Amino acid sequence: MIKKEDVLGKLSNVLDPDIKKDLVTLNMIKNLKIDNNDISFDIELTTPACPLKERIKKDCLDQLQNLGKEIIFKINFTSNVLPYDKKSMVKNIKNIIAITSGKGGVGKSTISSNIAVGLSKMGAKVGLIDADIFGPSIPTMFNCENEQPTFKKDNDKNMIVPIEQYGIKLVSMGLLVPKDKAIIWRGPMASSAMRQLILDVEWGELDYLIVDLPPGTSDIHITLSQNFPVTGSVIVTTPQKVSTIDAEKAFYMFNQEKTKVDVLGIIQNMSHFESEEGKKHFIFGENGGLDLSKKLNVELLGDIPIEKSVSESSDNGYPIVLKDENVSNIFEEICHNIARKIAVSSDNSFFNRPKGK
């Protein structure tokens, strides 16, 4: 008769492809059940966006088949996104991801929107803050410009109830002030608004909170990095030299002692345009983002071409990642890369979590 120890012994030979430790040591095997010739168990991942599920499953079956050809195995995948900082003042938000750029006009908000929706499509609970307080565009990209958040009392404090669209909880100053009013604030007021958009919102439980920061380096960036446990940042650039120069400044801002945030990687947007004949045209130069990632020794998380469908989807309030388009696959791969970087980071890996039963 097969015992649990026999199954776990075989599974201890299966390594997590990213972490390079076995599934048993990492406490990933859950709910192991043996019923005569039926063996079932769950594999608990640190992200629902894991792109290597089939590989892990195949490696498990290759090891387990030695227990007997007549045995039927049922393997189920679950996920438990781990918090970056268990002592965080931000309750129920496991990871904060800052999306930034050195200069405006590089498609940062479009990318923020699609990252949020892409992670949600993969099964994660996601929130999105439009922290570009002076130029909010997220309401347009989510087709909720005419909606307004509601408020609820929580211990005598008014809490904002975020708008929910496409599975994303989102807040934006664009939803809190009239569309025909410009926000003219000095730095301290903008910083205060940044804190309120995190602390005074009824977020519920989130795996990832995406923060779409304004371009450049400002008080808002400083407030976020100094007051909240940001898991990591993503820097958006085009290949153009004037864009990569400013993107490099954004990188070094997050590497200063007082504003230290891990840079998960760089996304190169508008990398090229492909004609109907299949010829690539490098309108803004070639490989500027790739060269910058090599110079700074960070990962190039994705390379997004110029596609008319991307801008049209943003203007129509329906993120492109929700559609069956070639560029949608690129955004999904970017989401996989971000989730993987977070899952295997030294501060947020399996290594130090307690053993489960």
Image (tube, grey):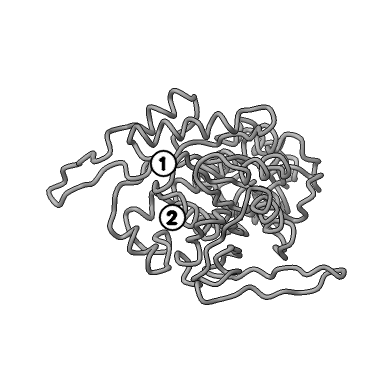
Using the image as rendered, state which of residue 110 and residue 18 is in the foreground: 110
In the rendered structure, the answer to whether residue 340 lies left or right of residue 270 reads right
Q: Nearer the viewer, mark 2 or mark 1?
A: 2
Q: Secondary structure at mark 2?
A: helix
Give yes or no for contact between labels 2 and 1 (Cβ–Cβ under 8 Å): no
Residue 95 rendering spot, x and y as whole percentages: 66, 48
Using the image as rendered, state which of residue 264 and residue 55 is in the foreground: 264
State whether residue 156 is above or below residue 13: below
Whether residue 41 is visible, yes or no, is no
CA separation in Å, label 2 and label 1: 14 Å
Residue 79 rendering spot, x and y as whole percentages: 64, 52
Residue at x 23%, y 39% (from the top left corner): 282
In the rendered structure, the answer to whether residue 58 lies left or right of residue 349 reads left
Task: Give the residue pinned by disc 1.
Answer: 302
Residue at x 38%, y 69% (from the top left corner): 316
In the rendered structure, the answer to whether residue 330 lies left or right of residue 338 reads left
Residue at x 80%, y 41% (from the top left corner): 355
Residue 247 rendering spot, x and y as whole percentages: 46, 35
Q: Amino acid at mark 1?
A: Gly
Q: Amino acid at mark 2?
A: Thr
Task: Give the residue pinned by disc 2.
Answer: 110
Across the whole image, how many numbered discs are drawn on residues? 2
Residue 277 rendering spot, x and y as whole percentages: 12, 48
